[in-house]
Amino acid sequence: MTPNLTTDLHPAGHDATQAAARVLAGGGLVAFPTETVYGLGADATDARAVARLYAAKGRPAFNPLIAHVGDLDAARRIARFDERSLRLAEAFWPGPLTLVLPKAAGCPVSDLATAGLDTLAVRVPAHPVAQAILRAFGKPVVAPSANISGHVSPTTAAHVQGDLAGRIDLIVDGGPVSVGVESTIVACLATPLLLRPGGLPRADIERVLGTKLTRPAQDVAADAPQPLAPGMLASHYAPRTPVRLDARDLRPGEALLAFGPCPLAGADAARTLNLSTTGDLVEAAANLFGHLRHLDTAGASAIAVMAVPDEGLGEAINDRLRRAAIPQH
Ligand code: TXA
Ligand code: MG
């Protein structure tokens, strides 16, 4: 499952910026410096590119990703701001602040990048190399920290190379980063919540908001916010229709989420979607949330899901499917 790519390393500059924009447009993966840490970028609107990104990081689960854009205008095309979030953006962007906001209508960011959520994490990085790449590419770029899952976030191009050489297309070397910890994440949905402390101090944010920031009720690891406050942020996407895993047959009224060349007998074509007819896990990941959403509107008694092998991206797909199968209220 480990891709074996040739990873180019370019010093930052005009040529590297153009190369980065070309790789992103072709669905590839580019590591680049932001002021916080190096990010691993992919076209946020291309689900297959996003699936490759999860595979390159070896993520055991599809955590939602941060969409990076060049300025506030670009951010307003993908997320809905209110008076408070606008004040924070105007005070701290570009900079080490990520805002979690409702997705804008028609937001082109793929469902896989947001892990199926209706909210979107957005950030405008200040680093000139990140800025140049975002402007040259012209579309939102999702970028988790450019390390293998479970390793520390990289602050130099050499760190990135150590972790990801052979797994990504390009590393743009802009020298060591200045902040060295990830961005501060604030959810502006209801009461502003501090989801992750980071490069922008909490007190600066509280000064602009004029109120204290609260943390989500659940105590969570610093680098892995799992927002759990009911009604404000769901920790994961789940369809309204019940989900039945590891289906080997179909029951009356069920829709089918198939995987592989042989969908279950008796499937109703109008209520069947296949994650990948060839059994390709990258394709399956790219289709996962879109297919679930679609089948959720089919008026079925349940969504029967065929088994997906628990290898490579299959581990993350199964993690998300198990969460989707937890009953909602
Ligand atoms: O400084 C940073 O933020 C770096 C640079 C590259 O920009 N990026 C970064 O991304 O740290 P990542 O993927 O390592 O961390 C993003 C965090 C994840 O823990 C994820 O759970 C959270 O943001 N997140 C993303 N979308 C979210 C959403 N809609 N609701 C709640 N949390 C979200
Ligand atoms: Mg990270």
Image (tube, helix red, strand yellow):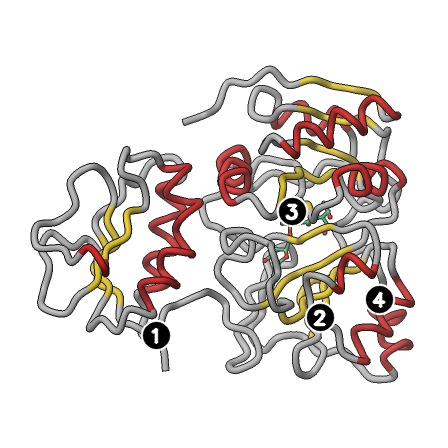
Query: Is 76 left, or right, of 238 in this rendering?
Result: right
Residue mark closest to the camera, 2 vs 1: 1
Q: Are marks 3 and 2 in contact (CB under 8 Å)?
A: no
Q: Say which residue label 4 marks.
A: 89
Q: Are marks 3 and 1 in contact (CB under 8 Å)?
A: no
Q: Assess mark 3: CB under 8 A from ligand 1?
A: no
Query: Is 108 left, or right, of 295 in this rendering?
Result: right
Q: Which disc, if any, is residue 240?
A: 1
Name the residue located 67 percent from the left edge and 75 percent from the top edge. Answer: 215
- Residue 74 in picture, x, y percent from top left: 78, 57
Q: Which disc, if any, is residue 142?
A: 3
Amino acid type indicated by mark 4: Ala
Tell which circle, 3 or 1, labels the residue nearer the N-terminal end.
Answer: 3
Name the residue located 39 percent from the left edge and 51 percent from the top edge. Answer: 288
Tell which circle, 3 or 2, labels the residue nearer the N-terminal end.
Answer: 3
Amino acid type indicated by mark 1: Arg
Q: Say which residue label 2 marks.
A: 194
Name the residue located 23 percent from the left edge and 59 percent from the top edge. Answer: 270
The CA distance from mark 3 to mark 4 is 18 Å
- Disc 2 element: strand
Amino acid type indicated by mark 2: Leu
Tell which circle, 3 or 4, labels the residue nearer the N-terminal end.
Answer: 4
The CA distance from mark 3 to mark 1 is 27 Å
The CA distance from mark 2 to mark 1 is 28 Å
